[in-house]
Amino acid sequence: MTAGLSRLARLLNMVPYFIANPGISKEAAARELGVSVPNLTKDLQQLFVCGLPGYGPGDLIDLSFEGDTVAVVFSAGIDRPLRLTSTEATVLLIALRSLAEMPGMVDPSAAQGAIAKIESAAGSAARREGAGSDDGDGGVGGGGVDGGGAAPENPVAATVRDALQRDRALRLTYYSASRDALTERVVDPIRSLLLDDHTYLQAWCRQAEGVRLFRFDRIDAAVELDEPAEPPTQALGTDEHLELFSADADLPLAVLQIAPDHGWILENYPLEPVRTLPDRSVEATMRYGSQEWMARLVLGFGSGARVVDPPELVEAVRRRARAALDAYDALDA
């Protein structure tokens, strides 16, 4: 889920939220909505210019501020029940099915309950329009609802989601791809995110003292701790930590030379181009946690990449390449 979609969802929920909580303070609302007070204020200012077509003074959402409290004067109809066309219902059903299959994003049983209600409300038209869009399993209504219920949720994903809902800290056993090792750390969960077709937990890592992203399918174990999650204020309500690859200055730095016809390496790996050489090859840098892991990665590129520095990594790649050639020579002997 992109930052824009995340903010849009929050804005759409704010008017019903403030109608249900008249006179609530900004601090309390920010805490419950999981944002900082400055970001909440920006959202409220954005709502002032949202409303019905025409967008005149009587069409826009109107909010009242008394001291530090917020109240809705005019909702512009956002609090009215949403009416879906059959096409809109079909799209929503497909999206809900996708969310239900993403670990940790939503409670699968709640998603399946919502699917059942939408199917019932939309009627047979939505089922007919959705026929064939769910890989032949009987249309929009096939599978989860009519097929005997959803598969049980992964216990690790359920633990992480429960900790998010209860604002509890977590102890994670996590596979770090950059270090090629299992690590254990205590984190303060912030939210779950969908990025590049994978679900991530965004959390404050007490070990690294920074915001980190943890891919759900790489969390080996999760234990909810009996202590509150307390991420620093500066870690909340910001999207500046959503880079999937963040450089750790404590990790060693490799300098690679990427061949001209292997530019795809630069696009698919966390490499930082430094300069283009006369033969159109590119010199780039990359942080790594394990020398053996980095050596295997470079060898996998074949002639497309060459290690320039550090010397110990150059030697590790040379040693592995020589061992592979010796193994082939042994087969021919």
Image (spheres, grey):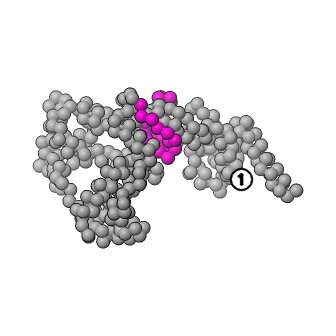
**In this image, 237 relative to 184: left or right?**
left
Instruction: Name the spot of residue 259 as percent of width and height, x first.
Output: 67, 52
- Residue 289 belongs to the span the image colors magenta: no
Q: Which residue reaches farthest front?
A: 148
From the viewer's perspective, tell me whether residue 214 is left or right of residue 332: left
Q: Residue at x 25, y 48 (%)?
A: 12
* The magenta stretch spans residue 220: yes
Q: Give the range drawn in magenta.
A: 199-225
Q: Nearer the viewer, residue 300 or 56?
A: 300
Residue on which the image places disc 1:
303
Residue at the limit of the structure toward the right, as seen here: 333
Please determine whether, in this image, residue 301 is positioned above or below residue 140: above
78 sits to left or right of 296:
left
Residue at image location 75% in from the left, 39% down from the top: 315
Where is residue 74? Give x, y as percent. Answer: 13, 45
Q: Which amino acid does label 1 sit on?
A: Ser
Can I make out residue 105 in this image? yes
83 w.r.t. 23: above or below? below
Q: Examine the image and state in which quarter residue 42 appears.
A: top left
